[in-house]
Amino acid sequence: MALIYDLADPTELQGFVRGVQQEQEAARFVLSQFLPNDNIDDIEYRVTTGQLLDEEAATFRAWDTESPIGGRQGVKRLMGELPPLSKKYRVGEEERLRRRALETGSTAGLVAQIYNDAAKGSRAITARMEMARGEALANGSLVINENGVVQTVNFERKASHTVAPAILWTNRATATPVEDENAWLNVYRDTNAIDPGLVLMSNDRVIDLSLNAQYRNFASVQGITPAFLSLNQINLIRAAYSLPPIYRYDVKVRNDAGVQVRVIPANKVIYLPPAGEPLGRTFFGTTAEAIELQEAKQIDGALAPGMISVVDKTSDPVATWTKVAAIGLPVLMNPDLTLVATVAA
């Protein structure tokens, strides 16, 4: 195969696939809000864990004495390789000739197909990265075993940050989720000295709370207990008991076998830090395809890190290929800013 540049301008194509990535992450794959993208010119990530916004309190000192020296919170370096992922799409000789005949010799149809395939590839990579983010948040680790890639990354979240209630929330008559959460939040505060910003949960768990006897009793007015509660009412009760608001998350992705799978298991709820706390990043490195484009002076060096798309051509048989590629991985730099509860079977 040989890269070709005459059908789709490489710089425009990169802007296009990254625009699709941004649209997907804003509308659907929202875990990027908590593990935002970081394009780096490397094939490895290196981070210092344990650096929080919260700082140890300063101390008063006597006049004309030296200022105490501040320490560094980070106590450990975490590093590893960014694995590659990619997808490519073929336009064969028959399809190309039919498009050309329909468009009286124009290549506009082929160019449109290249951009359509680039969008599909961008969505596919963005979906896989969302699955990886969900696994990292839910398990405190990542296990990859596909297409010859075998890699395990343990972010070493504290064991005390994986919890479960005495009575599962699916037992709506007797479960006591308010007491459960207050106990878990005490663990979170003891570790981090801050409250979580929100709790991520599926719609099934929201329904459990909307029908939970304890919550409904809290919403009683003049002896009348509502049969169920709206999410608004649930969050009002939660605010009264200093519990973080609920972020409903029910995203599913079709895996490589075409099966719809949940990004985060429906039986888990995940407590996440407030905005600005350095939970982690999703690192995207520089692909070999990007280096090819850069060396051919088809893209600027600043555009090399991150998701990339190229157009290839084969001559026997004649075919045009559109490929979208990336190397990347989500990394939890401060895994204890998460706490996961398994609240259903």
Image (cartoon, rainbow, N blue to C red):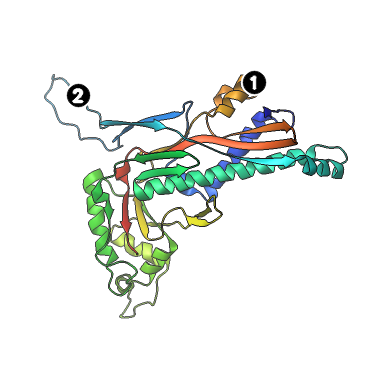
Q: Which residue type does callout 1 highlight?
A: Ala
- Seen in the picture, residue 152 relative to 78 is either above or below; the reply is below
Q: Quadrant of the C terminus?
A: bottom left
Q: Residues within 10 Å of mark 1 (few under 14, many from 20)?
A: few
What is the x, y in percent for residue 158? 25, 45
Q: Residue at x 20, y 35 (%)?
A: 57
What is the x, y in percent for residue 300? 60, 23
Q: Quadrant of residue 183?
A: bottom left
What is the x, y in percent for residue 290? 58, 27
Q: Which residue is mark 2?
A: 69
Residue at the extreme left of the image, as rendered: 62
Q: Quadrant of residue 3?
A: top right
Q: Which residue type does callout 2 highlight?
A: Ile
Left or right: residue 330 compared with residue 177: right
Q: Quadrant of residue 118?
A: top right
- Seen in the picture, residue 119 relative to 170 is either above or below; the reply is above
Out of 86 and 36, give the one closest to the viewer.
Answer: 86
Earlier in the chain: of badge 2 and badge 1, it is 2
Real-space Cα distance between discs 2 and 1? Answer: 50 Å
Q: Residue at x 60, y 24 (%)?
A: 292
Residue at the extreme right of the image, as rendered: 104
Q: Which residue is mark 1?
A: 296
